Image (cartoon, rainbow, N blue to C red):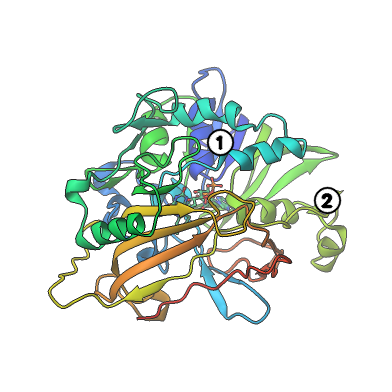
C-alpha cells in the first residue's frame, strides 16, 4: 500500500509494541494502517544484518551502529554520562536486545491495579503473554503453544562451563532450582527463556511484521522520523515527518505513539503536550499542560563484574553468552525477585570504551536491579527536532530514598 493519502490509523515506531500493533490492527482488511519508523527496514531474513539476526551477539556490540539512537543518560548527578541504547530499526529494541524472554512479576501488575489501572492485573495479562509465545519447553495453563515468538531454554547438556559452575554454586548457596522462570511464583536458579531459535533472534519484525507486510491495507514507511503529532483543538489528526529530507504531513483518524519509553514522551513534548514551563522554555506552544510527561522513567540498572577465567577455558565469541540466571529477593526487601544475576560466558570491553565485541575479556556476572525498585528518572526535551543521534541528553535517575543506589554499568576485569 502506498504511504500517501489518509489512513485510519498511523502507528509511530515499529518496535516491540508498534510492529505488533500494526500487524494486529491490519488484520481487519477494511482498516488502512500506516506504520512509520525512523530506522531502516530489512524485509527479508537474508538481508537482515548478522548483528541483528544472530542472537549470540550481545546488544552492547551494536551500540555505535546505525541501529541505535545514541542516547546518553546520567544515573545520578555525580555519575559519568552513559550510553542508553534504544533500537532504531523495524523491530525497535527487540531487534537488538538481550532476547531474555522473562515475564514481569505478578505483584507488579497487581500493584498497578491497586493504583487504579484495573485492566492490568496479572490474570488479565497472562492470556496475552501466552498468545505471544510458542514455548518449546513447557506447556500447560501458563504457556502458549502456537504464538508467533518461539521461546526456548538451553538444555543443561549444552550449558557452557561457567553456566554449570554458576548453577552449582547457587544450589550450594541454598537457592532453589527454577526450571521455568516464567512460571508464576518462580524464583531461584535455572535456564533463561530466550526468544532465539537456531541462533536467530525473533524480533517483533520477524514474528509479526514480516507475515503481515504483504497486506494491501498496511503501509510501512521506514527511514522517516516523526517530528510531531498534528493536533487540531484537542484531537490528533495526523503527524508531521521528515522523509528523505522532505517534511511530510500525513493525516489519520487515529495516531498511536509507540516510539518507546524515550521516544513517545519526547514526541508528546514536541507536540505541545507536557509540563507547560518546559514547553515554554523550548518555545513550543502548549496544547495540554501535563506535568507527568517525560517523568517517572524507570530502567533496570546492571552492574557488570568481569572475571578472568583459568587459561584452559577457551572463550569463543560465537558461542551463547546468556544461559542461566538466578532470581531472588534481596534480604529485607518487600519486592519479590527484585534481584537477578545473569551468568555471561563471554565478556568483552565496552564498545564505547574501544572494545570490539569479539576480543575476550573474561566471564561476567551481571546483577540486575529490577524495575519495581524505587529509583526513577526523567527525560527532557533537549532539542526541538528528533535527530538520529543524541536527541535527548538529560535523563537522570534520582537516588532512591530507601538506601539502595542505582549504579552506572562498568567493566572491571
Ligand atoms: C540493549 C537492550 C537490551 C535489552 N534486553 C532485553 C531483554 O533481554 N529482555 C527484555 O524483555 N527486554 C530487553 N530490553 C528492553 C526491551 O527491548 C524494550 O523494553 C522494548 O523493546 C521496548 O519496546 P517499545 O515498543 O516500547 O520500544 P522500542 O522497541 O524501542 O520501539 C520504539 C521504535 O520507535 C521508533 N521511533 C522512536 N522515535 C521515533 C520517531 N520520532 N519517528 C519514527 N520512529 C521513531 C524507534 O526507532 C523504534 O523502532 C532491552 C533493551 C535494550 C535497548
> Where residue 54 appears, x then y in whole percent?
27, 52
- Name which of mark 2 and mark 1 comes first in the sequence: 1
Is residue 44 among the parts visible in the rendering?
yes
| Secondary structure of residue under mark 1 | loop
- Image side of residue 106 versus residue 287, left or right: left
- Residue drawn at (57%, 30%) of the image: 125
Q: Is residue 192 left or right of residue 270?
A: left
Marks 2/1: CA distance?
32 Å
Picture quadrant of residue 4: top right
As drawn, the label of residue 52 is none
Front residue of 64/316: it is 316
Count all numbered tags in the image, as a single digit: 2
Q: Which residue is mark 1?
A: 4
Residue 77 placement, left or right of 133: right
Which residue has dot 2 on it? 290
244 in relation to 10, above or below: below
Residue 247 lies, in percent from the top left, at 62, 53
Circle 1 packing at 10 Å, graded few (<14), some (14-19), many (20+), is few
Assign a secondary structure to mark 2.
loop
Amino acid at each position: 500500500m502506498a504511504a500517501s493519502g489518509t489512513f485510519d490509523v498511523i502507528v509511530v515506531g515499529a518496535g516491540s509494541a508498534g510492529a505488533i500493533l500494526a500487524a494486529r490492527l491490519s488484520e481487519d482488511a477494511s482498516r488502512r494502517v500506516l506504520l512509520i519508523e525512523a530506522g531502516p527496514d530489512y524485509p527479508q531474513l537474508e538481508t537482515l544484518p548478522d548483528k541483528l539476526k544472530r542472537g549470540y551477539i550481545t546488544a552492547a556490540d551494536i551500540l555505535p551502529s546505525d541501529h541505535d539512537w545514541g542516547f546518553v543518560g546520567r544515573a545520578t548527578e555525580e555519575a559519568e554520562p552513559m550510553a542508553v541504547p534504544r533500537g532504531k530499526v523495524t523491530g525497535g529494541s527487540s531487534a537488538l536486545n538481550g532476547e531474555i524472554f522473562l515475564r514481569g512479576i505478578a505483584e507488579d501488575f497487581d500493584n498497578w491495579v491497586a493504583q487504579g489501572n484495573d485492566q492490568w492485573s496479572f490474570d488479565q495479562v497472562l492470556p496475552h503473554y501466552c498468545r505471544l509465545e510458542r514455548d518449546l519447553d513447557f506447556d500447560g495453563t501458563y504457556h502458549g503453544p502456537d504464538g508467533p515468538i518461539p521461546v526456548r531454554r538451553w538444555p543443561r547438556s549444552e550449558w557452557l562451563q561457567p553456566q554449570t559452575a554458576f548453577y552449582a554454586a547457587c544450589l550450594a548457596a541454598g537457592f532453589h532450582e527454577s526450571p521455568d522462570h516464567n512460571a508464576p511464583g518462580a524464583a531461584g536458579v535455572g535456564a533463561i527463556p530466550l526468544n532465539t531459535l537456531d541462533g536467530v533472534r525473533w524480533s517483533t519484525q520477524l514474528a509479526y511484521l514480516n507475515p503481515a507486510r504483504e497486506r494491501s491495507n498496511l503501509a510501512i514507511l521506514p527511514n522517516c522520523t516523526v517530528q510531531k503529532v498534528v493536533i487540531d483543538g484537542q484531537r490528533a489528526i495526523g503527524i508531521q515527518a521528515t522523509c528523505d529530507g522532505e517534511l511530510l504531513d500525513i493525516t489519520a483518524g487515529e495516531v498511536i505513539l509507540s516510539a518507546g519509553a524515550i521516544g513517545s514522551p519526547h514526541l508528546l513534548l514536541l507536540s505541545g503536550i507536557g509540563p507547560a514551563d518546559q514547553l515554554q522554555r523550548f518555545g513550543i506552544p502548549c496544547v495540554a499542560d501535563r506535568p507527568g510527561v517525560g517523568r517517572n522513567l524507570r530502567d533496570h540498572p546492571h552492574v557488570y563484574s568481569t572475571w578472568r577465567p583459568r587459561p584452559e577455558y577457551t572463550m569463543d565469541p560465537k558461542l551463547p553468552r546468556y544461559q542461566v540466571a538466578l532470581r531472588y529477593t534481596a534480604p529485607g526487601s518487600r519486592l519479590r525477585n527484585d534481584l537477578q544475576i545473569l551468568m555471561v560466558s563471554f565478556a568483552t570491553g565496552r564498545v564505547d570504551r574501544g572494545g570490539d565485541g569479539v576480543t575476550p575479556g573474561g566471564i561476567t556476572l551481571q546483577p540486575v536491579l529490577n524495575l519495581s525498585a524505587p529509583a526513577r528518572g526523567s527525560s527532557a526535551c533537549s532539542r526541538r527536532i528528533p535527530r538520529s543521534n543524541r536527541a535527548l541528553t538529560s535523563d537522570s535517575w534520582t537516588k532512591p530514598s530507601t538506601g539502595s543506589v542505582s549504579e552506572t554499568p562498568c567493566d572491571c576485569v
